[in-house]
Amino acid sequence: MNARQAAIERARACFLRACWLDVAVRKPGNVSRDSPGHRMQASMFIESARAAAGPLFAPGLRVGERIEAAVEATWAVAGCNTNLGILLLCAPIALAVEQNPAAATPAALRAAVESVLATLDIDDTRAAYRAIARAHPGGLGSAPEEDVHGAPTVDLRAAMALAADRDLIARQYRDGFADLFALAFQMPVYQAGPGNAPADVEAHPDAATVASVQRLYLACLGAFPDSHIVRKHGGRVAQTVMTAAQAWRERAGDGVVLDADPEFAAWDVSLKAAGVNPGTSADFTVAALLLSGWIRSCAAPARGPAGGWHGS
């Protein structure tokens, strides 16, 4: 296996681990293994990750092709949209790692992502539009310019820039993933060490990993009004959830074990009861875990495949 192939496999493993942690850890409002909701179960997200990982990290594919193929693979196993935002964020990262397998620092990795964004073309837009229309995320609606249900006239980065003021994921394409990199590397999150998701997907992360993933999620949710909440419930609800996340993040920073606090679980239940799903913050959490996992994997000794979850 050459360096490029090895890098792709490491990035794929980091993606699968990030997706496993996404549902292995309670993140209020989101589906987790111990807290289903929004008519979805954690198993749907696990199966989606397994199915999407192949096309998302397929060598030689462009960003739009990765997004479209991964959405189709997801629908084949889940029958609904479980991961569109994750795929939109992770596809440029996957190609950046393939093209720059030696990008072993946050600065180098961000430069690699910027290089990918600079080469996006109208074919990427067409494929991404088809994928978004297929996934039909909640609250999608229509846009006055470059609506996903019409034929695009600009490259994917330019199309995303038109939506950047109302959609946090689109803003990453415009701004070189600045927000995502800041959140992924602003604090010592997810310090349990590199590695793949366990072969037993029912395994539980250790307490330190749970705490760091929750802090990362609360940092994402507390930094911006969640785009998914804004689309479905409006800015006032999104602001209320953001303020609550900031308070919980402060408590976590003070050493409170959030999973031991009944009020934390109660907040999770109340959000789901109201149909409030901070989906964009969950997407950011997965992509941030992919970024930080990749950087750690660059410094880690090589691991054999026996101990890793490769989605098979």
Image (cartoon, helix red, strand yellow):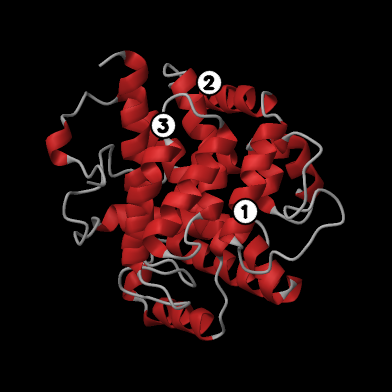
User: Does residue 211 show up?
Assistant: no
How far across and how far down the image is residue 303, in percent? 19, 29
Corner quadrant of residue 124: top right
Q: Earlier in the sequence, mark 2 or mark 1?
A: 2
Q: CA distance from mark 2 to mark 1?
A: 29 Å
Residue for point 30% across, 13% down: 2
**Circle 1 crowding by C-alpha within 10 Å: few under 14, some 14–19, many from 20:** many
How far across and how far down the image is residue 33, in percent? 31, 69
The N terminus lies in which quarter of the figure?
A: top left
Could you tell me which secondary element the residue under label 3 belongs to? loop
Q: Look at label 3 and name its amino acid.
A: Ala
The residue identified by callout 1 is 132
Q: Look at label 2 and name its amino acid.
A: Ala
With 262 as the anchor, is 63 left or right in this view? right
Q: Look at label 1 and name its amino acid.
A: Ile
User: Residue reaching furthest left?
Assistant: 306
The residue identified by callout 2 is 108
Q: CA distance from mark 3 to mark 1?
A: 20 Å
Could you tell me which secondary element the residue under label 2 belongs to? helix
Q: Name the residue nearer the viewer: 40 or 234.
A: 40
Q: Answer above or below: position of 49 versus 14.
A: below
**Circle 2 crowding by C-alpha within 10 Å: few under 14, some 14–19, many from 20:** some
Q: Are marks 2 and 1 in contact (CB under 8 Å)?
A: no
Residue for point 41% across, 34% down: 57
Between label 2 and label 3, give the one nearer the viewer. Answer: 3
